[in-house]
Image (cartoon, grey):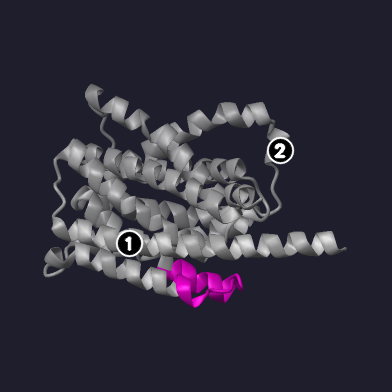
Amino acid sequence: MSARIFVTSPQLLAVLWMLLACFALSMIAAIGRHAALAGLHPFQTVFLRLLIALVLLLPFVFHAGLEKFKTSVFKLHLFRAANGICAMWLWFYAVAYIPIDEQTALSFLAPIFTTIGAFVFLGEIVRIRRVTAIIVSICGALIILKPGFVEFSFGHGISVLSALGMGISMLLVKSLTARDSALKIVFFSNLLMTPVALIPALHVWQWPELELWPWLLGFGPCAIIGHFALARAYGLADASFVSAVDYARLPFAALIGWILFSELSDVWTWIGASIIFAATLYITRRELKLDRKKQIKNSRRLKET
């Protein structure tokens, strides 16, 4: 009985979906950094990332049927797209200027905005343990950046701004998942942002070198998997809970940066990552226990009636 509850727990499924999103989004950062090192402008990188993902999405959309992609919250999709494109431009600019593990660490400021917004706008109950886990995780991120915070560069500054955009985006995704499917959310996001991203891309356009195209084509599957998994995670659990699991992106980013770019993370990165993992594991296990108790209690009530 307890094993079945553990496997089917929405919180556990949300964590698994979020871990998949963390890996896929870390790969997007790696592709963006490689493109920047190869001389591709972030405006062009953003457009190609959106275009390739949109093309790969179309077969799924036509298979499901266009009639299933009607929405009653189109304005909310527009708002999410407007916020998303700004956050994405800033995000890819940051990846071009600083190593992906540092950029990832600074992006962990996003859950602060998400948790505050979830409490203020969505009316979610933010337990003290969630707040504690996020604060501890932020401390872990600051430990990672301790050597570099003496000189707060342009790349670090736009990373903070992109984190603000990401925090807003998390709230919007949470609102959209209550009305639309994950596939619909991802499709509208790419459909609305792609033509907007084309405008600045045209001003800096240069055809990528042939060796760069396999990397760029990787944007499609990574973006679809990442954002689909993200939407699924936020549809299964509270935004403030899911955002705490987002810290798992750091070890992924550090490992990918080491393998692909020989960007060796120092001891502070791994000390910070250990703190982040410990905080995330604690809050996840706590939420699972609460969820199991709730399901057992509901099961007993049904038997009594």
Give the secondary structure at mark 2: helix
Label 1 crowd (10 A; few <14 / some 14-19 / many >=20): many
Instruction: Say whether residue 265 is left or right of residue 134.
Output: left
What range of the chain is rendered magenta? 112-130
> Which label lies toward us, 2 or 1?
1
Query: Which one is earlier in the sequence, the residue at label 2 or at label 1?
Result: 2
Q: Nearer the viewer, residue 69 or 23?
A: 23
- Residue 52 position, x and y percent, is 43, 32
**1 above or below 217?**
below
Instruction: Say whether residue 193 is left or right of residue 66.
Output: left
Residue 70 in magenta stretch: no
- Residue 296 position, x and y percent, is 69, 61
Q: Main secondary structure of the magenta part?
A: helix
- Residue 147 position, x and y percent, is 12, 65
Q: Which residue is mark 2?
A: 68
Q: Which residue is mark 1?
A: 276
